[in-house]
Amino acid sequence: MKEDATEDQIKSVAEKVETIGARAHISEGDVLTVIGAIGDPEQVAGLELDAAPGVDHVVPISKPYKLSSLQFKKGEKTVVDVDGHKIGGGYFGIIGGPCTVESLDQTIETARVCKDAGVTMLRGGAFKPRTSPYSFQGLGSEGLQILAKAKEETGLPIVTELMSIRDVDEVVEVADVIQVGARNMQNYNLLTEIGRTGKPALLKRGLAGTLEELLMAAEYILKEGTTDVMLCERGIRTYEPATRFTLDILAIPILQGLSHLPVIIDPSHAAGRRDLVPPVSMAAAAAGADGIIVEAHPDPESALCDGPQALPTEEFAEFVEQVNKVAKLIGKTVKEK
Ligand code: PEP
Ligand code: MN
């Protein structure tokens, strides 16, 4: 729509789109309103929307993903902004915290270190996707309450995983950003439900997911009305056993060339080893990532999950400083402490 398009003009275009059984998806940016007409391309073309009052121009999007495509927002990048804590569109963000909420003390201690180090958001899992059903599965509801306290204490937005539709109401109460774990990238019912909450989402690439499949998964969330999804490369399964997963660093420029959504890197799960986390985080920042999500623990040796890849909290501030330096070098805005 044109910059000065009125509410009535926007409404009338959306109604027109719906007359042919297509779906009108209205997305209001800072400057522009974009109406996605999702349906049969020939029928949409037949509406001759170019001539409708308030319409600036019509772009056919031939890619299977529409709402997540770069064209959808005319090249404007999405900034995920939770109460001023920003990631994307030139803002580099660090999401830090424990893999898993284990106790109030461990979580608050880590949260304080993260806050003092200048992270953008706090991560922590209450519902954990574990390979073994006999491993610690997370504190569940109690973990969410601890995360709420950590937010109270630090003011940092909370990023936490939702594994099951069953828990959506509870997670929405506490989460500022809902994480979709790698193993759930193609759990389409879960994605749809997350989209319906309208909350920002952090969508991890599946262990064997292609980039196009990742964008299609984001589409499931966006089509329900959520506008903010962060795409997260966290390593994929290859034949190489030297690291836990193989980090696809090229996913950064490729996804950024295809989508307006922020692209973040998870060095922790890709590497599986803490000594590899700083170099690959700096590489991600240098390659233009919009942020990273990284695990830290006050006592990694005693961590109930992912200890070997957790950065000790005493090293965290220096780590953040180093990564932010690289991000600044390539022109990103980083959070000032
Ligand atoms: C996590 O972030 O702790 C996690 C389980 O990640 P992933 O889904 O990428 O394995
Ligand atoms: Mn983890």
Image: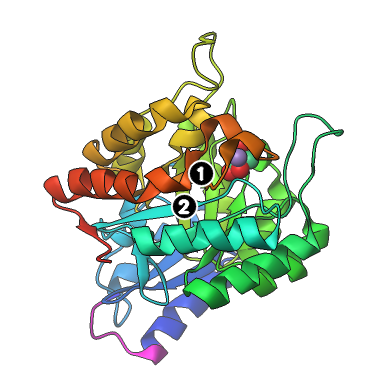
In this rendering, position of residue 272 left or right of residue 267: right
Q: Quadrant of the N terminus?
A: bottom left
Taking the image in four quarters, ligand 1 sits in the one at: top right
Q: Position of residue 309 (x, y in %)?
A: 52, 32
Residue under numbered circle 2? 96
> Nearest the camera: 194 or 140?
140
In this rendering, position of residue 257 left or right of residue 227: left
What segment carries the magenta color? 2-8
Q: Position of residue 205 (x, y in %)?
A: 54, 37
Residue under numbered circle 1? 295
Q: Can residue 242 be seen at all in this image of the molecule?
A: yes
* Residue displayed at 61% across by 34% down: 301
What secondary structure prevails in the magenta region? loop
Q: Position of residue 120 (x, y in %)?
A: 39, 62
Q: Residue furthest right?
A: 134
* Residue displayed at 46% across by 30% down: 274
Q: Does the numbered disc 1 mark a residue whose Cβ is under 8 Å from ligand 2?
A: yes
Relative height, residue 10 to residue 85 (above, below) = below
Q: Can residue 235 be seen at all in this image of the molecule?
A: no
- The mark found on residue 239 in the picture is none
In the rendered structure, are the residues bearing label 1 and label 2 in contact, judged by CB atoms less than 8 Å apart?
Answer: yes
- Give the crowd class for mark 2: few <14, some 14-19, many >=20 residues within 10 Å: many
> Nearest the camera: 257 or 174?
174
- Give the crowd class for mark 1: few <14, some 14-19, many >=20 residues within 10 Å: many
Q: Quadrant of the C terminus?
A: bottom left
The earlier-in-sequence mark between 1 and 2 is 2
Q: Secondary structure at mark 1?
A: strand
Quarter residue 192 falls in: bottom right
> Nearest the camera: 104 or 277?
104
Relative height, residue 111 to residue 69 (above, below) = below
* Residue displayed at 61% across by 62% down: 195
